[in-house]
Amino acid sequence: MGKKSYEIRIYTTTHMDFELSEEHKILQSEVRKFAQNEIVPVAPKYDASGEFPMETIKKMGEMGLMGIEVPEEYGGAGMDTLAYVIVMEEIAAADAAHSTIVSVNNSLYNHAIMKYGTEEQKKKYVVPVATGEVIGAYALTEPQSGSDAGNIKTKAELSDDGEYYVINGRKSWITSGPVAKYIILFAQTQPELKHKGVTAFIIDTEKEGFIRGKTEPKLGIRASATCEIAFNNYKVPIEDRLGEEGQGFKIAMSVLDAGRIGIAAQSVGIARAAYEASVQYSKERYAFGQPIGKFQMIQQKIADMKTRIEASRLLVYNAAWKKMQSKKTGERYTLEASMAKLFASETAMFVAHQAVQIHGGMGYSKELPIERYFRDAKITEIYEGTSEIQRYVIARLETGLK
């Protein structure tokens, strides 16, 4: 056999650029100012009452934050995914509940219609949500199908004349459900096909046959309203079907990839707020004649918290970059989104726990927001795919074993 020659090229760079663009820095600065000045002062009140923060949500809509990646022609800000995760971190650092509302509007509702909707659907259903005029929601979970998203029981039957679907069933844990004007719903059109028989629809909640259940009393993100919804012979026109029949499960899973990036960014924001409060407290709180920040056990906590936050942010930025690249390549970013969501959410819980410990009794008191960070952090390990599901997704993709 003849010899083959191989050319080896070595590429060198002087540095790897992790700097944000000037546009992204300006966005970060402006959103941080808004979040700290407008959200931080009212967050305890909304957390205590569980009231939906419509006033601040309207202001965020005016800033373009309820439709960050939506093109300007559809009422959005026309920015990229990196801009979205920057916004999510800053809003979450002020109050996680506000960022949850931002996440659902952007990642789940707007993203789904912009990717799979018709031109008419984009104009009718995205514009009012992207501008903050009304709220959007996403209904996948049912009482018996949380992580098992393919086990949907809600049914949508096509009418004899083929003009509309009749929907019956229940959905649970619907974020923004109590206030949403429009909801993306997933229902079975061919139950015998299981997940391949799921179809997506855009629901107008003001129509007959739509029923809202009670608002759920939650441990955390209390200002983000959540409820059960039900459908009793609800009629949805065929033009409000999102995508084709049987495409619903594919739509749901691809949209959750985007949603997981948003929750990962939210997790970084919660962790950052808890960390910054802890650093400040470690310098102000004295014990045995010195700041507690001088004790090695506190220093270890601070070091671990900081390292995990920085690693989480890099995973989030990487997932955001992969999502932006997917528009060119068409490649899924499921792996990157799941890794970011898994690590960042567990970091949020870890950092919030350490923050409570550093603050001692004050960390357990409602006089400081530390206990709220702790309560808010927990949900990031649960919604839009539990940590267990993320590990399953990552391992399946890496091994190829299903």
Image: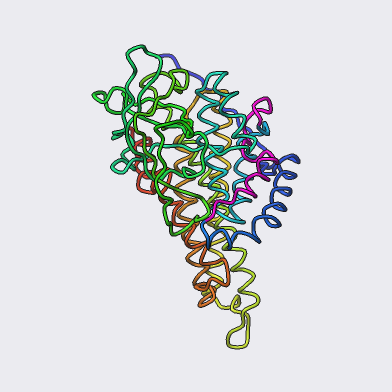
* Residue 231 occupies quadrant: top left
- In the image, is residue 58 part of the stretch drawn in magenta? yes
Considering every residue shown, the one lying at the far top of the view is 161
The image shows residue 48 at horizontal and vertical percentages of 53, 63
Q: Is residue 402 visible?
A: no
Report the front residue among 4 and 71.
71
- Total marks in image: 0
On screen, residue 288 above or below 224: below
Toward the viewer: 259 or 351? 259
Q: Which residues are magenta?
A: 51-75
- Side of 147 where 133 appears, left or right: right
- Whether 47 is among the magenta residues is no
- Quarter of the image for the N terminus: give it: top left
Residue lying at 62% horizontally and 88% vertically, measured from the top left: 289
Residue 26 coordinates in the image, percent (x, y): 75, 44
Q: Quadrant of residue 80?
A: top right
Answer above or below: position of 157 versus 375: above
Give me the residue at 47% from left, 29% from top: 332
Q: Position of residue 160 (x, y in %)?
A: 32, 13
Quadrant of residue 66 within the rendered picture: top right
Q: Residue at x 54, y 31 (%)?
A: 111
